[in-house]
Amino acid sequence: MTFDVVADLGGTSLRIARMERGAAAVTDARRMPTDGLGRHPHADAGELQRRVVAQLIGELGAYLGSPAGAGADAVGLSFAGPMSADGLALAAPTVWGAGGAPLAVGPVLEAALGLPVLVANDITAAAWRYADAEPEPFCLFTISSGIGCKVLRHGEVLVDAGGYGGELGHWRVDPAATAPRCDCGGRGHLGGIASGRGVLAAARRAAAERPGDFAGSALWAGAGGRPEQIANEDLAAAIRAGDPFATGVLEAALRPLAAAVGAVFAAIGVRRYLFIGGFAVAVGPRFIEVLGDQLVRAGCFGLTAAQIRAMLALGAADDDHSLIGMGRLLAHRLPARTAGVAG
């Protein structure tokens, strides 16, 4: 049976798995913390790049030498950052922070692993999971440690040769000098406000600024009354349960995300939006309900409230999107086992 090894590199975790050609799921998945910004917050970008590359080579090499990976035809890596058509990782704010020179991840891995390697932006890869099931065009958002999005139309993800496109997470939605800081170093970016990290930071700020409201929230007990101890898992659970304090934080955070959806709709007429990523999945259907409320309030020209809400949906309730999509992209792009890069 022909199979590939697929990996997903994010700001929090590196996952590696096996995917047989034509399969609908991955098997033999392994997870480990990414040896990047999250573990070494004070290291510079150059050091973090070296750490992450060494980790990729070591972990992928070990997997390829294991019973699960031995005999793989190719390796696919979904990467949390924009990729150019010639294979350069242009940036990776959640992995190695601001700065860092463009990095030729694919060629480096090919030389080390001795197999064809295809590297794609993680949201590009995830979009391929849904390419056969969703009507085109559709827009896929990931709401996790950061925010990314891609539009898939006519079987291709809309990015230019330089890898630009689908980076609404770095759209500046708050021009204030004191706006929340994004992992890329900028302030007021959508990803610094409406991502899982952004919503958590907003909840902690709100708890410190409004101690009376915090004391009446379900978050109080889990945090021991200390705003800085609020955890993402508790925040998601409180939102699912309808806690007014937690829901209010989410509503404020999702207003600029609703504006982003409205802008994509107004600009190119996309009427299908899927949301994946750890935070969106953790909050569940309530995430779509609250986002729908904000989008209805903002309006989409020519659409009724029911039509607006019908545009929004959660993706599958797992974190295999980029792994499965990477496997499908490999099968599509490397039928002759020729290495390459996808935006």
Image: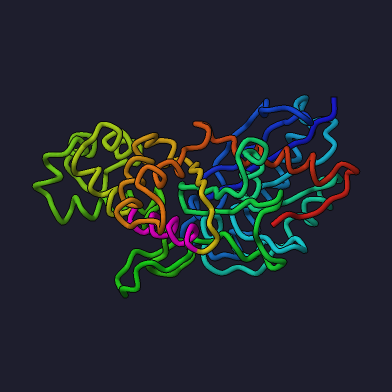
Query: What is the x, y in percent for residue 31?
Result: 59, 35
Magenta range: 254-266
| Looking at the image, residue 317 lies above or below residue 253 | above
Can residue 85 be found in the magenta stretch?
no
Query: What is the x, y in percent for residue 41?
Result: 46, 57
Q: Residue furthest front?
A: 302
Q: Please report the residue visible at 54 percent of the width from the left and 65 percent of the height from the top.
A: 44
User: From the image, which quarter does the N terminus lie in?
Assistant: top right
Query: What is the x, y in percent for residue 311?
Result: 46, 44
Main SS of residues in magenta: helix
In this rendering, position of residue 50 left or right of residue 76:
left
Query: What is the x, y in percent for residue 19?
Result: 73, 31
Q: Please report the residue visible at 62 percent of the width from the left and 66 percent of the height from the top.
A: 164
Residue 310, by quadrant, is top left
Can residue 263 be found in the magenta stretch?
yes
Count of numbered circles in the view: 0
